[in-house]
Image: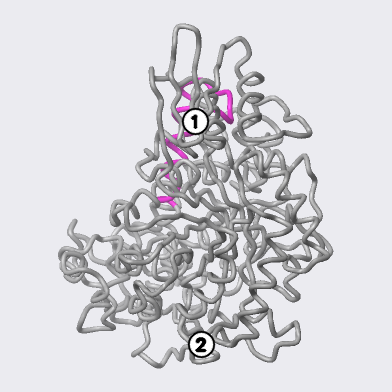
Amino acid sequence: MKAWLHSFPDLPDTVASPADLARLELESALPGTPCTLEHVPAMGESYRVEKTAAGYTVSGGDSGLLYGAYALITRILSGESVPPVLASAPKYGLRMVDCWDNPDGTIERGYSGRSLFFEGNRLVYDPARMRELGRLLASVGLNVLCINNVNVHFPGQLLLEDMLPEAAALADIFRPFGIRLMFSIDFSQPMRHGIPTADPLDSAVQAWWKETAARVWTAIPDLAGFLVKADSEGRPGPFTYNRNHAEGANMLAEAVKPYGGIIVWRCFVYNCRQDWRDRTVDRPKAAFEHYAWLDGQFADNVILQIKHGPFDFQVREPVSPLLLAMKHTNLAMELQLAQEYTGHQIDLYTMIPMWRELFAEMPADNIMSIAAVSNLGRDANYTGHPLAAVNLFTYGLLAWDPDTDAEASVSRWARLTYDFTPEQHRCLVSLLLSTRRTYEKYTAPLGIGWMVNPHDHYGPNPSGYEYDLWGTYHKADRNAVGIDRTASGTGYLEQYSADLQEKYGDPATCPDLYLLFYHRLPYSFVMKDGRTLIQRIYDDHFEGLEETKALAEAIAALPFPEPDRAEIFRRMELQLRDAREWCDIINTFFHRLSGVPDTHGRVIYD
């Protein structure tokens, strides 16, 4: 099953341009439907599809024609009506997928097989699969693909002359799909080439990056730019030289600017050697403290890429205060398609309900770009779990239009992917939309996060990180649980505007699902519905397990085709086991601490 493109005809071996590809796609996917293409260069990526008595007219720039063709095709193939005029322009200019692929073929946090791009420290890829991947991404409006890990492994091969021809050939494959490549780089790379420093204000360092940019853009003239992780989790960066991150990013930005290149600078910077005894440090405060004061100091071709929440892709996090604070800086929101903390693409977890919640908390105009950590790999279905493809599909639609409706987008994916009856279709869509809340119920409660097994992050371990160095603590004891992040606690909440401080600062007004992120509360705390906090924890976990059992029964009743069916059932069995482990271990953990029994008398293990 080729995800949502299983109904599309095979692609030709070569395609000249997005406009030529748009024509081929319309002719092959909609035979007998007259379609006219009108090239309007000034429209760029936007498109207009007009229904006429003679058929359809698609207008747009080069990429706009392709996006308009895919918009028309997917609506017709999914059985949706096409309005008389279908016009759209992307909200964000950069709509990126970040692949954490390593040159040896492994993928950091990869759950879909080995790398699509690398093997044996070389670029090794199947051109036919690359064309298919380009089609997958372009069909939902994505336009930038970073192919290597932000944790760049020596020797940073993509910048070396012996790999650039292969990278250029890969760029040639993706170009007709309107997709530009991006490379992750190591900030200290000059030191591997005879320069004793990586100080961004050093003239030799500046010259090396300018020479490197000239070489790279000569090979790939439309390279989007470089992605940088600096001063984070052991990665080198400007702090080594007492420079700030604007100085580091701007040095690189100057090197790539002559070629239209951009620097995407990740803001995932925090103290990863924290002492759990030190209550003065609160990891979620770090990004704001490092960057907010630099607002307005970054070059115009620098984009700060900020994780959507202040922690690290937990199942429940508030929107990062940094995304709300920097009004004079180019910002990108970073999401994670790879299910690092949400089930490893074993447990079902449809993400678009979570994304829609984030945008409800943040004006879309606060960001100009969007990026997501890839869930792709070399598995035949690209995403390991066949149903995990819904996250890549809906991410693309959301990256184009942040007002995308969750149910409508999941429904479109389901119709394009499986030939179900209307009742079966409604069942699948309902199940997929429920999975985020179900997963949240049986894992870490009410905004805590992090109760996972260290290192691989799959399965429950309520104390796995509690005394570790990563700053991911819940401080549960026999009396209370959670972190006080109000002004009387760590002060994290003060990074938000006054209205959000008021909303979240009082447990009486704080939404239940964020309670333990913002507040330290006794187990006897009475929730809005009259239950105690401890009873709510018990109830959520028992409900999450029961909902997973019901999910498994409903999934089993749907007529998925092979090989999807066997793989979905195999992973559903693993998810059932995982849900039971979470329910029993978390409930037992809190029961042993609090000594409070479940009011319903359900089994909690002593």
Three-letter residue code for mark 1: Val
Q: Which mark is residue 40?
A: 1
Query: What residue is shown at x 49% (from left), y 33% (from top)?
Result: 428
Mark pair 1, 2: CA separation: 47 Å
x, y percentage for residue 380? Answer: 73, 43
Would you say 300 lies left or right of 236 here?
left
The quadrant of the picture occupied by the C terminus is bottom left
Amino acid type shown at disc 2? Phe
User: Looking at the picture, how far across and down is residue 21, in whole percent?
Assistant: 65, 30
Residue 437 magenta-drawn? yes
Q: Which mark is residue 268?
A: none
* Nearest to N terminus: mark 1 or mark 2: 1
Residue at the spot 66% in from the left edge and 39% down from the top edge: 176
Check disc 1: other Cα within 10 Å, few if <14, some if 14-19, many if 20+. Answer: some
Q: Relative to residue 292, is residue 553 depicted above or below?
A: above
* Quadrant of residue 276 within the rendered picture: bottom left
Which residue is rendered at x = 48% and y = 73% of the image? 268
Q: Which residue is mark 2?
A: 239
523, 518: nearer the viewer: 518
- Camera-side residue of 283 and 72: 72
Highlighted magenta segment, given as a residue range = 415-438
**Quick one: SS at disc 1?**
loop
Tell me where residue 189 appears, x and y as whole percent. 68, 79
Q: Most prominent secondary structure in the magenta stretch?
A: helix
The structure residue drawn at horizontal position 53% and vertical position 79%, both measured from the top left corner, is 232
Of circles 1 and 2, the one toward us is 1
Tell me the crowding category of disc 2: few under 14, some 14 to 19, or many 20 or more residues within 10 angstroms, Cα based: few
Compared across the picture, whether 303 is left or right of 497 comes to right
Q: Is residue 73 magenta?
A: no
Tag 2 secondary structure: helix
